[in-house]
Image: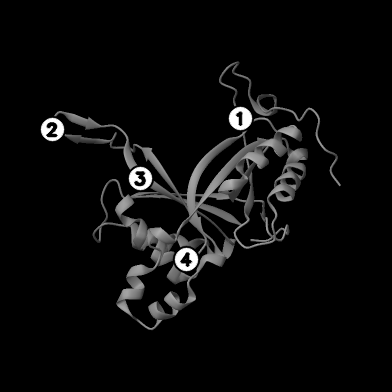
Amino acid sequence: MKMVRAIVRPEKVNEVMAGLMYAGFPAVTKIDVFGRGKQRGLKVGDVTYDELPKVMLLTVIEDKDNDFVIETILKAARTGSAGNFGDGKIFVSPVEESYTVSTGKAML
Amino acid sequence: MKEVMAIVRFNMMNVTKRALADAGFYSLTTLKVTGRGKGNVDFFLLQGAETGHEEAVAQLGSAPKLIPKRLITLVVQNDQVKNAVKVIIEVNQTGQKGDGKIFILPITDAVRVHTGETGEKAIDNVLKGVPVK
């Protein structure tokens, strides 16, 4: 299994969530986060916004769905056709086990 | 070291914390999150979206249908993973959909900021753990 953590623009969240639902991955956890990237935040005139609001979407998937899910998130989260700075990042990490609390069984 | 990431019901937070503390897992980090699972899918809406109704597509994944949950993260020693999972499941299980999920992720290193200790020394050892069945 893989855990996909996607940090996306808050205004793109609904699109990403809809895309995932449509692709057959309804289970997603949403966390509001603040952060900065390589561009060191945002400079507007003399004002620097160091930490920008983003949303982290967390989902755990089977290994075989990895590429498909990332492709789905990319398609929904990118602004314009070429994309822009601040569109976000996707991190994938391994998950060794997962349990469903209601049944107590080790299954996704 | 393993990271145990549990998503549980909002009102189960206090009992879960108490049960974990009783089992010796004192250190944890929590987050307030919202989310949806397999059981929270509106199939009527999904069907509408599949047949191409624009209203249904627009409503897919919109915010109000996300349910508030608590995310508990604890980093434990390898041999305590089963124990932690057991404690969390025992307390949170009602048998209904929406009880939550537990994920186990590998952690390659940990550092205690206070002393600079690294590796397994940086993680608390369970003092009075319940025996693992």
Task: Return the residue at label 3.
Answer: A54
The answer to whether residue A107 is left or right of residue B56 is right
Describe residue A23's horizontal placement relative to residue B122 as left or right: left
**Tag 1 secondary structure:** loop
Is disc 2 placed on a helix, strand or loop?
loop
Q: Nearer the viewer, mark 2 or mark 1?
A: 2
Q: Inspect this view and state whether residue B107 appears.
A: no
Q: Secondary structure at mark 4?
A: helix
Q: As rendered, which of B117 and B18 lies closer to the eye? A: B18
Instruction: Find the distance from the CA under tag 4 to the CA under tag 1.
Output: 32 Å
Measured along the vertical axis of the image, is residue A63 above or below residue A42?
Answer: below
x then y, percent, for residue B100? 61, 54
The tag on residue B110 is: 1
Q: Which residue is mark 4?
A: A68
Q: Mark 3 and mark 4 in contact (Cβ < 8 Å)? A: no
Q: Which one is in front in this view, the residue at disc 2 or the one at disc 4?
A: 2
Of the pair B30 and A60, the residue shown nearer to us: B30
Identify the mark at residue A45; answer none if there is no mark.
2
Residue type, numbered disc 1: Ala
Image disc number at residue A31:
none
Instruction: Name the residue nearer the viewer: B4 or A63.
Output: B4
Q: Are marks 2 and 4 in contact (CB under 8 Å)?
A: no
Mark in the foreground, 3 or 2: 3
Q: Chain of mark 1?
A: B
Please name the amino acid that badge 3 sits on: Lys
